[in-house]
Amino acid sequence: MAEFLTPYGKRPATRDAAVVGQGGTANQQYFHGNAALFGGVQYHTPWKNLVLKAEVDGNNYQQLPFGNTLPIKSIFNFGATYQMKNADFTVGVLGNSQVMFSISLHERLDTLNTPKLAEAKALPVDLKTVGAYNPNQFSNPALFIASNAPPAAAATVVAAPASVPATTPAATAVTAKNAIDPLVSEGIASTSSNVSVGSTQNPLSVDARNAPSSSAGLQKQIITTQYNSTLVDFEQQTQWQVKGLRGSGKVWTVHLQDASGVFLRSRINRGITVLHRDAPSAIETFQIQFYNWGMLVSEFQVDRKQWMLSQTQLLAPSVRYPSITLVDTAALPADGGNPFFRGPSRSSSSAAPSLIANDQGSSLEPVMIDKLDHKPYRTNIGVSYAQIVGSPDAPFLFALGVKADGLYKFRENTWVTGTVNARLVDNFGKYVIDPAPTGLQPVRTDIRSYVTQSIATMPNLQITNTGKIADNHFVSAYAGYLEMMFAGAGGEYLWRPTNSRVALGADINRVRQRQFNVWTSLQNYAVTTGHVTGYWDTGVQDILVKFSYGKYLAGDVGGTLDLSRVFQNGVKIGAYATRTNVDYAQFGEGSFDKGVYLSIPFDAFFARHSDSSANLLFTPLIRDGGAMLIRKYRLYDMTRTRDSRALSAGPD
């Protein structure tokens, strides 16, 4: 075969010896040396799922690196595979001298999905009056959508809970007259202090014909607690924290606090079901505002009538349009005008809201505000797990332990977090590395010492502050023990328009290396590190391109290219490569940093919604060149709901 493989007339008779432990390329090994045939066939038998295999292997396995040899008595290999839905079982004979057995597990990650059976039972959606739409007037609800008739007159402001609970049949016929007119006097409103959401009569219902003819002299009402049960049910259905509810005109606005996750549409739909159950008929629009760490990140607007019809009717394509849309927040203040973050006055009782005279005669402002209070702290005890796949010393390194996490909020946008970890079992003692002779600072290759020196460690303790300085512009600042190996302070800026395919960010950090016991003491090595990062959603096969350029932890300068794809169920797969001004020899074996990663949201395989993900990183080698600071909070992740694809993930 040597003559057949001769390139350009030059005989590749010899192959250089394998070089291990150094960076560079193997150009003098490809297509050099002796060659031999390799090939095989497989036969799908009449027996279901059984496959027989045979192959010819011309390698004599006598010239492997490190002096390894294998006994080979034949060039023929034989095997049989039994294929199942998620596993293949194989047995075989290699070279007439070895017997092998293997199990291969496989799954279509893009189709992973589990019904949420461990959550609160989903509520039914009733077909009922919404605004000018009355289902009793149309035998086919689509006729109303297709018509261009102007909406009928209706009460314009709703400021009281629905008068009938969703469990009674009367709830399906709530009309505009069952709402409080915005012009009701304070004296009338005060009679409702003992009315609950579940009452079957609404003494506050006032005929609009008897209301004052002018809305001048009215301003925003004080906070009520009449809709607390609605907000609690919203939390139970979505597993999100609700900060409050605001009603104005024909709109209800729900303010969510630190809401995240992958299956947004599914959780929003469950929350809308609660709002639709309790909102009076005059409410035509729901607004769901996402406040992540005090910043208004995104707003989803819900056309209540269209949403109700899409949930209860089979609509023709000509009258079908999205009922939930991501809207631009540019017209809102940086905090969204959220009254719950501004400390408005609170009513001393649970009475229904009343209107307060306004001497300046301004127009009607929000007529109803309801708020839920949450504890400023959160704690959690769970299992900690870290792994490295692809190490040359051990193909799989892991550390298993128990960790305790804590968080305390001073304000909505200022908080402190901490983690304490107790290691139970690991095999990082197998990790051994000889530092490169040119000596890059060991910013990552000391991982064995960081993992094994102390049983109890404090991987993270930091204070973080975030802000939205203008629409599309987000900032954060942080300080403390930022990761297992480094402590310091830094800041980040992100420009990310709503529904945009591009974003641009930058971060800068001054950090010092931590001692191996991973507590409060530090080493002498310090470095300023940071990057400018661009994000581009290509629109092709859901591929995201991310490129970062800057200074890394070892002081080297260069860039990282990251390509990833997110499937409809939130599973993310990606690959990255980093090239800096460190040459191959100085970097060491591997030549440059690279890896493949997989992220699977717990939403995909747990029976209840979760904001967490399982992450797997395959990196051939751990080296010091091209090492980035691991930051706990990244603005791009915190603003994920601004993505045009935010509603695309999930079964809905």
Image: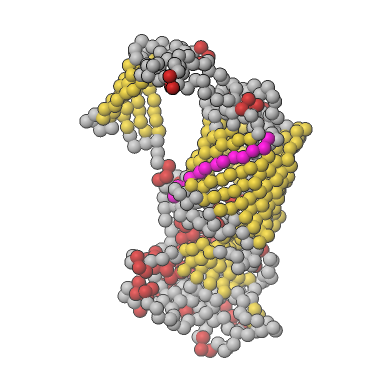
**Which residue is farthest front?**
9
- Residue displayed at 69% across by 24% down: 438
Residue drawn at (39%, 28%) of the image: 103
Residue extending furthest left? 46
Determine the residue positioned at 44% across, 11% down.
62
Quadrant including the C terminus: bottom left
Give coordinates of residue 393: x percent, y percent. 56, 22
Residue 91 located left or right of residue 425: left
Q: Nearer the viewer, residue 140 or 183?
A: 140
Colour approach in the figure: secondary structure
The quarter holding residue 190 reads bottom right
- Residue 143 x, y percent position in the rendering: 34, 74
Please provide the residue range marked out in magenta. 556-570
The N terminus: image quadrant:
top left
User: From the viewer's perspective, is residue 623 above or below residue 259?
Assistant: above
Q: Is residue 159 above or below residue 493?
A: below
Q: Position of residue 399 (x, y in %)?
A: 58, 31
Indicate left or right for 382 with 490 as reference: left
| 264 lies left or right of 105 | right
| Main secondary-structure element of the magenta-colored stretch | strand
Of 396 and 493, nearer the camera is 493
Q: In this view, does 519 lie above or below 259?
A: above
